[in-house]
Image (spheres, rainbow, N blue to C red):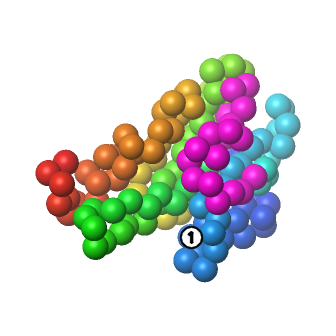
Amino acid sequence: MADVSDPKIDEAYQDVRSDKTETSWLLIDYESDRSDKLVLTATGSGGLQELREHLDDSKASYAYARIQYANDKESKREKFILIVWIGPGCKVMRRAKISVHSADVKSVLRVYSIEVPAREKDDLKEDPIVVRLRKAGGASYDGV
C-alpha cells in the first residue's frame, strides 16, 4: 500500500478543482527511492506544458491536472485527468508497485474523466488528450 496521508495532497487536489484559483495541476512523488510514502512535490498554473518540466525521467509519479478546451466559440469545458508517470529510467521494483499504488492514489484524487499513462513527456501533449476527453465526454460537436 502507498501512504497518501500527506494533508498537502488533499489541499492541492481541492485547489486544482476550485474555480477560484489559477492552480491547474499537482504532482505527487515518492518520498524516497525505498519509501512507499507519497508527498506533494509541486503545483502550478501553467498547464500540461509546465507540468512536463517537473517530471523526472528516473521516477514514478502521479499528477492531477485541469484541462480546459472549447467545443465551439461559445462554450468551454473543464475536465480533470489523472496522470500515472513512469519515467524511462524508473527502477524495476518501483514500476512493479505502480499498479497497486495507483488504487491508493485514486482514493485521494477521486474525480477525473480519464487516466493518462505516460512513459515519455510527449505522452502529455495536450491535443491528443483533448481528443480523448471529447470522446469520453459523450457530447461531441466536432464529429470527433
Q: Up-down: is 87 above or below 137?
A: above
Camera-nearest residue between 138 and 93 = 138
**Residue 101: image location, x then y, percent:** 63, 43
Examine the image and state in which quarter residue 95 appears.
Answer: top right
Q: Is residue 108 left or right of residue 79?
A: right
> Is 22 located above or below residue 134 in the figure?
below
Residue at (78% x, 50% y) in the render: 41
What residue is drawn where x is 51% and y is 38%?
124
Question: Is residue 113 shown to the viewer in this render?
Answer: yes
Three-letter code, disc 1: Arg
Residue span colored magenta: 42-61
Horizontally, is 107 left or right of 29 in the view? left
Please check the rendered image and state whether residue 43 is part of the magenta-colored stretch, yes or no.
yes
Residue 137 place in picture, x, y as percent = 28, 60
Tell me how many marks there are: 1
Percent position of residue 125, x then y:
47, 39
Is 6 situated above or below 83?
A: below
Q: Residue beneath label 1, please?
A: 17
Q: Residue furthest bottom?
A: 20
Residue 76 sits inside the magenta stretch: no
Residue 33 to residue 50: above or below: above
Q: Secondary structure at mark 1?
A: helix
- Look at 71% across and 49% down and name the residue there: 28
Percent across and percent down for residue 5 are 76, 60
